Image: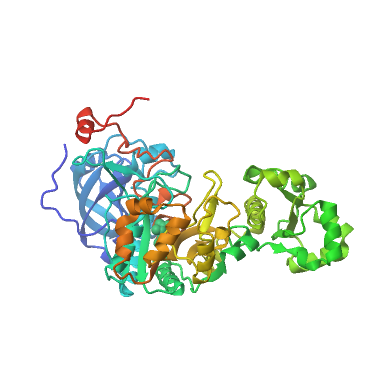
Amino acid sequence: MLDFLGDLQRTHTCGALRPSDAGKKAILMGWVNRRRDLGSIIFIDLRDRTGVTQVVFDQERNAAMHDKAEALRNEYVVAVIGTVKQRDADTVNKNIPTGEVELVAEELRILNESKQLPFLPCDTVLPNEEMRLKYRYLDLRRDAMQFNIELRHKVALAIRDYLSSQGFFEIETPFMTRSTPEGARDYLVPSRVQPGSFYALPQSPQLFKQILMISGFDRYFQIVRCFRDEDLRADRQPEFTQIDLEMSYPQPEQVWGVVEGFLRAAFKAAGFEIKPPFQRMTYDEAIRLYGSDKPDLRLPAMVDVRQVFSPEELEEFANKFRIRKELPLQLIRIPKAGDISGTERRTIGTYGGYVHVQGPTFVQLISDPKRVVKDYPAIAERMAKVGGVEDGDLWVLAGALNKAESASLMDQSLQGFCQRCGFLRLDLAQKYAEKHGAFKKTGDTTKDFRFLWVTDFPMFEWDKDERRWNPAHHPFTSLHEDDMSRLEANIDSVRDPKSPLGEIRALAYDVVLNGTELGSGSIRIHRQDIQQKIFHALGMSEQEARSRFGFFLEALEYGTPPHGGIALGLDRIVMILAGADSLREVIPFPKTARAVDLMVDAPTPVNEAQLRELGIQVKKL
Ligand code: ASP
């Protein structure tokens, strides 16, 4: 028989009682986390989100109540009225903040019972993830999840407070809207009143936030859900949360300053002091030095060692190893990982994703430095010096294979080559993580969190599949003022892979942390004439541009201030702060890799009547 709550009110939470409360009457409510039945005495650990308190039911004191407590099982919900007692020294539990006291029960009300559970919140061994997601409400009761969700709240609150203090207004933008070009597929919502027409869920509030600048709000932000229908990788979710902002009249540095400010506040909320300003690097440098537009600075950059060769030496070396001397000869160094076997050396570059990504023929690897040292002692010494090689480091040289037939097979540009070297660098970094130890947390935030601004991204990128230039960021990104004439000169070359469009720099930037992109943004185009030129360069006819973005092009014509902004992924930031390894650990109700919500069982087919109302017919495949 269950009891009613009646007019009972709890006096304390389950994490609150301390020795100073000894002798007080207390009313606690919560879940039965554990129950230990010692015969005449029953202990339960009573749990709520703030902690657990030990409750004692003593047969001698109150036999009826003790009998009732025998019925308690895991995850029953109870109210206990009792007196706080300081525990004897030998029974103190040092692992919990309430461990010096217990509540001696005088009255027990069983408010609700629980079926046998598929797993217990207090279990130390986790069930499989499918089970966790199906019974998410039970999974969320676990300490670790309670911690992550509270952290998420604190981080979001710190960001809101900071941005508000800097004059940003949080302004909502619609979910039912039209397509925004962020490069993914849209989620569509059919209209009942206009059958055959669809809303698109926003991939980002990009156009709305620009319009808010046109509307005079000066500084906007929103912690907002975005929807992108992409094939999901481990660190993606179909709906995710962005910290989205836009400002009027900013220089890029001002946007960066705001982001550094809110990240500092966010990290502080999680107990980490970070010290902006962050390091900055152009996209070109990042590619040359790290072979990546999101460099992980925790390991050394690559060094182009051609600088230590005389022209004759380089000629000889390049011939001997069949490498192209016009492309870098990259020294890749992994600290403290040097002591590897010959067999292991020979497999470098042939394992993991690397060979899969680069193909076997393009990068010529010289993975046995001993041989270089033997055959070219003077050059090797100079290389080791510029490369910062120390005793015990692993280092390899990567050049571009000089082989006519491979040229037609793949992109042999400087960028293509460096990116392949960058993959190799990361592969080695992963493989030898135990040895170099650079990914382990040290407690020193300047080492543990290596932030970076990557600036001057290219404006356009070549799409191999579609054989055309596409915007590297989105088509509202401004180009460098100095590159305007280059745009005008090449405005009709969208299908030409060799077009100098690829050299045009954008006023676009990314913020990167430990090799992960946290967010990207740009200064926007605020002039209608330039926006039209960009659409033209992207091969979009005036008519097409008008039909997709007419409202926006028109808005640009009514006095648009220069503006710019950025968006960062909140889920990812919280994941990093929580030390979690999946976004699903910090999103209360996430979807699986197949975009399914296992708890509510969505998506599902809908009934005929609903479809009819929407004028939709589903083809059975
Ligand atoms: N809308 C962009 C994105 O979601 C961010 C920005 O340019 O502000 O990536």
Q: Name the foreground residue: 93 vs 611.
A: 611
Q: Quadrant of residue 120?
A: top left
Q: Going 31% across and 43% down the picture, which residue do you hit?
A: 188
Q: Is residue 620 above or below residue 353?
A: above
Left or right? Give the position of 450 relative to 215. Answer: right
Decide which of 113, 269 is in the foreground and name it: 269
346 or 230, which lies in front? Answer: 230
Q: Is residue 298 left or right of residue 548?
A: right
Please state the horizontal and vertical placement of residue 240, each as a whole percent of the image: 37, 51
Residue 612 x, y percent position in the rendering: 21, 31
Residue 464 in view (yes/no): yes
Residue lying at 45% horizontally and 61% vertically, measured from the top left = 520
Q: Quadrant of the N terminus?
A: top left
**Residue lying farthest left?**
7
**Where does residue 156 sit, x and y in percent of width and height?**
34, 62
- The correct choice, above or below, for 563 with respect to 187 in the image is below
> Residue 192: x, y in percent?
20, 39
Near-viewer residue (290 or 21) = 290
Q: Quadrant of residue 51?
A: bottom left
Q: Dividing the image into four equal quarters, which quarter contains ligand 1?
A: bottom left
